[in-house]
Image (tube, helix red, strand yellow):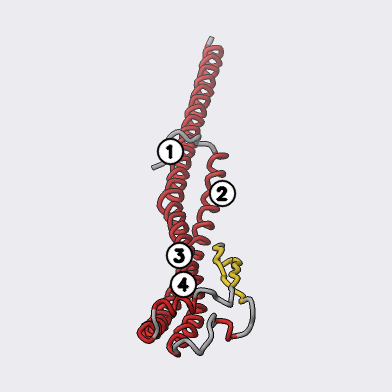
């Protein structure tokens, strides 16, 4: 509903028409952004689902190997073998802008490049199943890190989609209709004022014309009376 307190002037009408053009342009841009975000979000979720299935299968392998190793070795022996790791990992994070969303990108670097450094124990006193479990865990770690990156990106994009959706709805259902209603209200008032002004001008014109006719009749009557006298 139009705001009845607005000033029904041509200057205000021009301002509102400019505001409406800007709102419609912004509405289109936001809808395009929302649609593209939805497309990328669905692609990310599809990738995350496939990767999560892989991670779960790999973790089953890891847990199975640890279970077998636990059956072949005592818990004290396993704890002693794994208590002092030889390898350390440094995790770094940077951001990538995707449709105005800063999604994180994780990367990690090991202290050394030697693959054998993932085993913090000697092979003589441990089970081969423990070696398999540690190796599988090292490999699944990369997938888990990528999965965390993808799911975090999906979470951030979902939040941005919701914010964009609210803005689109605010423009589509509130701002644009209210501005259009205000424009109709001002246009109606200006048309009424113009018709009123035209009516007043016509009345003034009729009054002037009637006065001129009356004055002409009076002059004619005086002239006629003068000739007869």
Q: What mark, if any, has residue 37 been given in the picture? A: none
Q: Distance between the residues labelled 3 and 2?
A: 36 Å
Residue drawn at x 53%, y 82% is 121
Q: What mark, if any, has residue 18 been given in the picture? A: 2
Q: In this rendering, which labeled residue sits more in front, label 3 or label 4?
A: 3
Task: Give residue 58's position: percent from left, percent from top.
Answer: 42, 83
Residue drawn at x 45%, y 60% is 159
Q: Give the residue pinned by disc 1.
A: 3
Q: Is residue 127 visible?
A: yes
Compared to residue 83, the image places residue 173 above or below, namely above
Q: How far apart are marks 1 and 3 (CA)?
A: 39 Å
Which quadrant of the structure image shows residue 73?
A: bottom left
Q: Earlier in the sequence, mark 4 or mark 2?
A: 2
Q: Which of marks 1 and 4 is nearer the N terminus?
A: 1
Q: What mark, if any, has residue 39 been given in the picture? A: 4
Quarter of the image for the C terminus: give it.
top right
Give 126 or 214, whichever is nearer the viewer: 126
Q: Earlier in the sequence, mark 1 or mark 2?
A: 1
Q: Give the residue pinned by disc 3.
A: 155
Task: Give residue 56's position: percent from left, percent from top.
Answer: 39, 79
Q: Residues within 10 Å of mark 4 (few under 14, many from 20)?
A: few
Q: Distance between the residues labelled 1 and 2?
A: 17 Å
Task: Give residue 11's position: percent from left, percent from top.
Answer: 57, 39
Q: What element carries label 2?
A: helix
Q: Can residue 57 be seen in this view?
A: no
Give 5 or 30, whichever is nearer the viewer: 30
Q: In this rendering, which labeled residue sits more in front, label 4 or label 2?
A: 4
Are circles 3 and 2 on residues that touch, CB within 8 Å? no
Q: Earlier in the sequence, mark 3 or mark 4?
A: 4
Q: Distance between the residues labelled 3 and 4?
A: 14 Å
């Amino acid at each position: 509903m139009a705001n009845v307190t607005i000033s029904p002037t041509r200057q205000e009408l021009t301002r509102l028409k400019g505001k409406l053009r800007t709102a419609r342009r912004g509405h289109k841009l936001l809808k395009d952004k929302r649609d593209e975000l939805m497309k990328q979000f669905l692609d990310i979720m599809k990738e995350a689902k496939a990767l999560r299935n892989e991670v779960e299968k790999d973790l089953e392998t890891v847990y199975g190997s640890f279970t077998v190793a636990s059956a072949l070795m005592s818990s004290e022996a396993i704890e002693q073998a794994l208590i002092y790791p030889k390898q350390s990992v440094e995790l770094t994070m940077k951001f990538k802008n995707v449709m105005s969303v800063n999604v994180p990108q994780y990367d990690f670097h090991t202290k050394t490049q030697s693959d054998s450094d993932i085993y913090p124990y000697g092979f003589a006193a441990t089970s081969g199943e423990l070696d398999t479990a540690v190796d599988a865990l090292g490999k699944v770690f990369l997938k888990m890190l990528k999965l965390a990156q993808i799911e975090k990106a999906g979470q951030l994009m979902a939040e941005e989609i919701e914010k964009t959706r609210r803005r689109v709805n605010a423009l589509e259902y509130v701002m644009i209709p209210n501005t259009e209603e205000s424009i109709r209200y001002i246009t109606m008032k200006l048309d009424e004022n113009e018709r009123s002004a035209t009516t007043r001008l016509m009345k003034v014109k009729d009054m002037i014309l009637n006065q001129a006719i009356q004055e002409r009749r009076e002059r004619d009557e005086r002239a006629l009376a003068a000739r007869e006298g």
